[in-house]
Each structure stands twice: as structure tokens, then as C-alpha cells.
Amino acid sequence: MNKKRWFIFGGVVVAILLITIVGRQLAGQSGGSQGADGEVITLQVAHTQSYAPYDFVNDDGESDGFEVAVLKAVDEKLDKYQFDYTPTSDEDLLIGLESGKYDIGTKGAWYTEERAEKFIIPEEPIGASIIGFTIRKEDENTITDIDSFADSKGKLVPISPQNAQYNVIQDYNKTAKNPIGLTEAESFTVADAYAWVLEGRYDAYFDIKLSFEEAVTSEDGAYHQYADRLSWFAYKGIETYPLLHKNKTNEAFATAYDQALKELQDDGTLSKLSQKYFGEDVFSYVSD
């Protein structure tokens, strides 16, 4: 009787071991995203809560926006990872990334050397920010692009050297026939910039399309009173990136993220999401 019980118990142990081994082998064949032990890594994602359409909280209280939607598409491709989203302020996002409270932060961030020193920045951009020039409407027939503005010898509203926009103009000036005069900014508000252009103190303000549309074009914009006197034209798209807290786990994720982004670019997902949130393909403004 005891021997029979021993054989039955031994058979159960063997069966459990076989199920475990086969299960692990199958997991290792399921697309390569799972780790050897099948562990799923949870990454904490912080995003700005009111920077529509990049990142925001929708009417249902859910994390939403173009960059959030792209990260959700990345999450679907990577079985080894899952994301928890936290809407927060711009300041908390950056502080939280540095401290390790968050693994990923998305805020329509441009690449800068300072950010690259603090954070991991993947190779593949998550989106793009369209930047251009706010000018007086009376000048829109003669100043139609950055070259015609440069040729006009127009004065540009000063830009802070800490602002990535400063670097964009510097890069243009390196090869420009007529470099744009670049003055380092003192303290001023956006309202000052628009007013200075209208007053003739300056001839253009290097402005982000989204900012101009929300502040001036929109009927409830803070400076909509200038809508019939100001005009805006595009220069180029500046790529935006997620920022990652520096550690080995996130270094490995950055590699997986880059591969997923390439696939989303190739299958048209990024373009479709851009059309949904921006009404246009923002990547079409990015020069090769």
C-alpha cells in the first residue's frame, strides 16, 4: 500500500516537472519578447497632463494623446514589458525621471545635449514638433520661408541659449547665405513676443505651430485679438523623444523600443496616429 502511494506521488512530481519544462520551452519560442523566466517588467510612464494633443488626460480621466498612443502601440508589440501611466506636471516628470520614480517620461521633448547627459534618449523619435515663424500678416507675401526671412535681414525676437530653438537657428546659420541675426534672450513673455512683432521692434518670432494655433488662431486663445494681424509659416519638424531614467533595465528597453518604433513607422501606424491627433502627418516636416 505504501509503495503504491509512493509511485503515485512520484508520477505527479514527474508530470509537474514535464509541464514546467515544456511551458518554458514554449514561452521561449513565443516571439522572443519574453525573458527566459517569462518575467514581465512593469515600467512607470509619466506624461504631461495638459499638453494636447501630445499628452493629456481625456474626459474619461484616461491618459491620452499622440505620444501616449504611440507608447501604447509599443507596449502591444513588446510582451516583456507593460506600462503604467501617470499624468503629472512638467516639473514632477523631470524630477521623477532623475530620481527613478519614473522610468519613461514623455512631454514633446526635443533632443538636447543637456538631456542626453541626464537621461537615456532612444535613437528613434516618438513624434515631431513643427516649428516656424510668426510674422506680420502684411509681410506674408514677401516672407514665405526661412530663406526669404534671412534674405530680408529681418530681426528675430531673442531666444534663450538654453532653448533648443536657439540651436535650430544656429544650425541654419552654419550653411546659410545670409545668416539670421541671433540675439540671446532676456526675460520676456509670449505676449511680449507677439506685441514686439506687431510694433515693428522685431520682424519675426520663432514659434511652434501648436503654440501659435492655440494662442492666436483659436477663438478662445489668449492672443486671438492678434489673429487678423499675424501670420505663421512652417520651417521644419523637430523630432521629439521619450526620456528614460538611466539604468540597465531601461537601456535594454531603449533597444526594444527602437525596434518597435521602426516597425510602427513601416506599417503606417505612426502616420495614422499623427493624422488622428494632429490632422496631418507631422513626420512629413522632418527632413532626412
Image: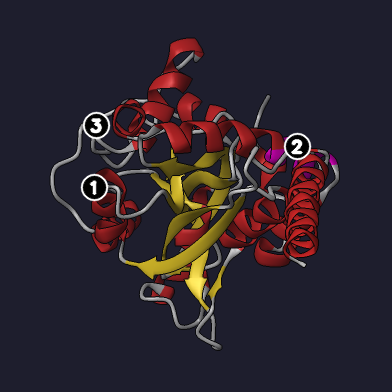
Quarter of the image that includes the C terminus = top right
Residue tagged 3: 161
Would you say 80 lies left or right of 19 here? left
Residues shaded magenta: 260-266
Between 108 and 201, the residue placed more toward the observer is: 108
Question: Please, what is the dominant secondary structure of the magenta stretch?
Answer: helix
- Camera-near label (2 vs 1) is 2
CA gap, disc 3 and disc 2: 44 Å
Along the polypeptide, which appears first: circle 2 or circle 1?
Answer: 2
- Camera-near label (1 vs 3) is 1
Residue type at mark 3 is Pro
Along the polypeptide, which appears first: circle 1 or circle 3?
Answer: 1
The residue that appears at 81% across and 54% down in the rendered structure is 15
Residue at far left of view: 187
Spot occupied by residue 223 in the image (x, y as percentages of width and height): 37, 72
CA gap, disc 2 and disc 1: 31 Å
Residue tagged 2: 32
- Magenta span includes 95: no
Q: Are marks 2 and 1 in contact (CB under 8 Å)?
A: no
Along the polypeptide, which appears first: circle 3 or circle 2?
Answer: 2
The residue that appears at 51% across and 75% down in the rendered structure is 218
10 Å crowding of disc 3: few (<14), some (14-19), many (20+): few
- Camera-near label (3 vs 2) is 2
Quarter of the image that includes the N terminus = bottom right
* SS at circle 2: loop
Residue 99 shows which numbered tag? Answer: 1
